[in-house]
Image (cartoon, grey):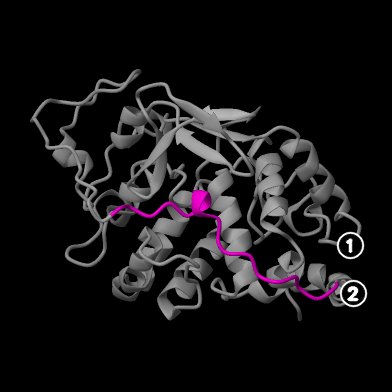
Amino acid sequence: MKSCHALLLLPLAGAFAAMAPAQSQEPPPAWAYPVNPPDLKPPVDDGALRRVPGSSAAFTLTQVRDRQFSPVWHPQEHPPQPEVVARGRKPDVPACGFCHRADGPGGPENANLAGLPKAYIIQQAADFKSGARRTSVPKRNIDQKPGMFQAATDAEVESAADYFSSLKPRRIIKVVETDTVPKTYITANHLAAVSTGETEAIGRRIIEVPEDLERFVSRDTHAVFIAYVPKGSVKQGQTLATTGGGGKTIQCAICHGPDLKGLGPVPGIAGRSTNYTVRQLYDFKNGTRAGTGSALMKSVVEKLTVDDMLALAAYTASLAP
């Protein structure tokens, strides 16, 4: 018997087959794939305890930089972390909560895992392990994933998937349509606004930055991000997502549900990082994300331009997760 997901996708075969051939490939947008400069030097730890609003916890900079440690600032808001999320397993399995944070919101440089289907998380781990899921721009944190999942046991992956899939996602993105944006620099594979207050034209970019960089550096799960997008982007994305743009793609709700919060094993795409979404769309089109289900997504995105991806990301990020 075919799975519910397989049955759901059968009526789409004709729609995928009818879509026109892909356009010429555009280069990956640098604003969506920030790569640390070779001379990046993290600030030295002065030993002071770091604190965040609404929490009695305190950690040093060295602690929040420890890949085998997931800082818990708001323990009342989520269940106890399983060992692989809280501390990982030395030397090859870092704490899942180090990158994705204690209750899974992640940041512009990685995935928000909160509330993703368990089966989907496990499949992504398998795709990273096999090398089927890669990145269009090397030297990013995703390059560490294959080795990490080759070292992780099936029980550890399942434990992490159980935990993150049980969590309720929440809104962490503010989408702002604008002509001008703060000037930025790259740190830890994401953009941050300069402290001088300088601005520049946005052009055809999304500039996603932490609202409060120090809270994000401290791995506070309450950190919020501002996604600056060109004016009109949200409406453009809504039209593409809800109509298919006259054959350019298909309606997102067919697979991701009427509110884009997911449908069965298909992940939700509402309320997620704009830059993360653009990277996934581009990687599907480019073929560097080629795991289970990717063939269907490649058919959906093959006619999309980077501008289309920008608009879709702006719209989906504006929705409640």
Residue drawn where x is 30% and y is 48% of the image: 98
Check contact, mark 2 vs mark 1: CB within 8 A.
yes
Q: Which residue is mark 1?
A: 247
Count every numbered label the image shows and give the total. 2
> Is 231 left or right of 39, judged from the image as shown?
right
Residue drawn where x is 75% and y is 70% of the image: 23
Q: Which residue is mark 2?
A: 18
Is residue 12 magenta-colored?
no
Structural crowding at the residue carrying mark 1, measured as other residues with C-alpha within 10 Å and reported as few (<14), some (14–19) or many (≥20): some
Q: Please state, as top left, top right, bottom left or bottom right, where the C terminus lies in the image.
A: top right
Residue drawn where x is 66% and y is 56% of the image: 306
Q: Which residue is at the front of the view, 211 or 162?
A: 211
Quarter where residue 295 is shown: bottom right
Q: What x and y, as percent, mark residue 210?
A: 43, 32
> Is 45 left or right of 306, judged from the image as shown?
left
Q: Please state, as top left, top right, bottom left or bottom right, where the N terminus lies in the image.
A: bottom right
Our reading of the magenta stretch's main secondary structure is loop
Whether residue 213 is visible, yes or no, is: yes
* Secondary element at image label 2: helix
What kind of residue is marked 1?
Answer: Gly
> Is 24 left or right of 244, judged from the image as shown?
left
Quarter where residue 231 is shown: top right
Q: Which residue is at the front of the view, 55 or 25?
A: 25
| Rendered view: 23 above or below 42 | below
Is residue 36 magenta-colored?
yes
Whole-angstrom CA distance, mark 2 to mark 1, is 8 Å
Q: What x and y, as percent, mark residue 119?
A: 56, 65
Task: Tell me which segment is drawn in magenta.
Answer: 20-37
* Secondary element at image label 1: loop
Whether residue 261 is visible, yes or no, is: no
| Rendered view: 45 above or below 85 | above
